[in-house]
Amino acid sequence: MNFSDEQIMLWLGSFLWPLIRVGAMLSVAPLVSSRSISVRIRGALAILIAIAIGPAIRYETVIDPFGLDAWLVTANQIIIGLAMGLVLRFVFSALEVAGHLIGILTGLGFAQFIDPDSGVPTPAIGRLYTVIGSLLFLSLNGHIILILVVAKSFEVIPVSLVGLSADSVWQIIEWAAVMFAGGVTIALPAVATLLLVNVGFGVMTRAAPQFNIFSVGFAITITLGFIIVLFSLPYTGDQFVKLLELGFEQIDRLELSSGAP
């Protein structure tokens, strides 16, 4: 049985190009990009996904994996994969920002440890929010939806010499604002409550100057911090789910704005 050069290049490309795009996405996607997950596991997962979605991909033109154009195609696949992974990464970063804000306002920020994902000191309350977000992401089958979105991206943004458009890159930059806006929204109940508490402390200090507010206020603030976090968890989960929905919608807009006309 004889195979033509075009058939061989098509078979190689049907595995190589999905592998590059999926591998780039997994390198920054939430949960999978954690330092606790080894590179071998991420590589094996990328290979399995590439093998699963490779036969369903239809190519308009056959690209030689060993030609000069392959370098440009490889760069485009890496950029597309990184863009899709960063969109959801910003959603999880919103939880970290909310944890930092609550930790600073309540005094819980003194409880810090080395985050296994980023390798930097992180408030314990921020890590708690990240764990809750990870469990919600898995319970809502977000990992499966992400794989389906990657598979769909090959239909909307086919493998070619043309990558993401300038509008798509600008959309990613604008979407980074969700990391701060979403974090403030999640931390809003704690911020509003502690603002009232601090106003009350100010009134008490003015009414009784001899009252040592620093010896009592710190303990009260930490206690209220635990209570606020406990009662605001349902609100936090709802806000995170909304951010996830907006994240997947952003990926769809990203693909549509870069798709072939």
Image (cartoon, helix red, strand yellow):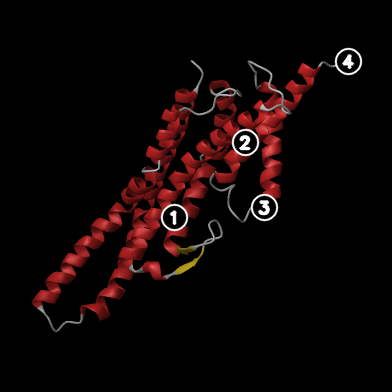
Residue positioned most to the front: 68
- Answer with mark 4 or mark 2, whichever residue precedes in sequence: 4
The x, y position of residue 84, in whole percent, is 51, 36
- Answer with mark 1 or mark 4, whichever residue precedes in sequence: 4
The x, y position of residue 243, in whole percent, is 40, 40
Residue highlighted by disc 2:
22
Q: How packed is label 4: few (under 14 Cα within 10 Å), some, or many (20 or more)?
A: few
- Answer with mark 3 or mark 2, whichever residue precedes in sequence: 2
Mark 1 and mark 2: span between their CA atoms?
A: 27 Å
Please state which amino acid type lies under the numbered disc 4.
Answer: Asn
Q: Nearer the viewer, mark 1 or mark 2?
A: 2
Mark 3 and mark 2: span between their CA atoms?
A: 16 Å
Q: Nearer the viewer, mark 1 or mark 3?
A: 3
- Answer with mark 3 or mark 4, whichever residue precedes in sequence: 4
Q: How packed is label 2: few (under 14 Cα within 10 Å), some, or many (20 or more)?
A: many
Residue highlighted by disc 4:
2
Instruction: Report whether 2 appears left or right of 22.
Output: right
Q: Quadrant of residue 249?
A: top left
Residue highlighted by disc 3:
38
Please state which amino acid type lies under the numbered disc 3.
Answer: Ser
Please state which amino acid type lies under the numbered disc 1.
Answer: Tyr
Mark 3 and mark 4: span between their CA atoms?
A: 40 Å
Mark 1 and mark 3: span between their CA atoms?
A: 23 Å
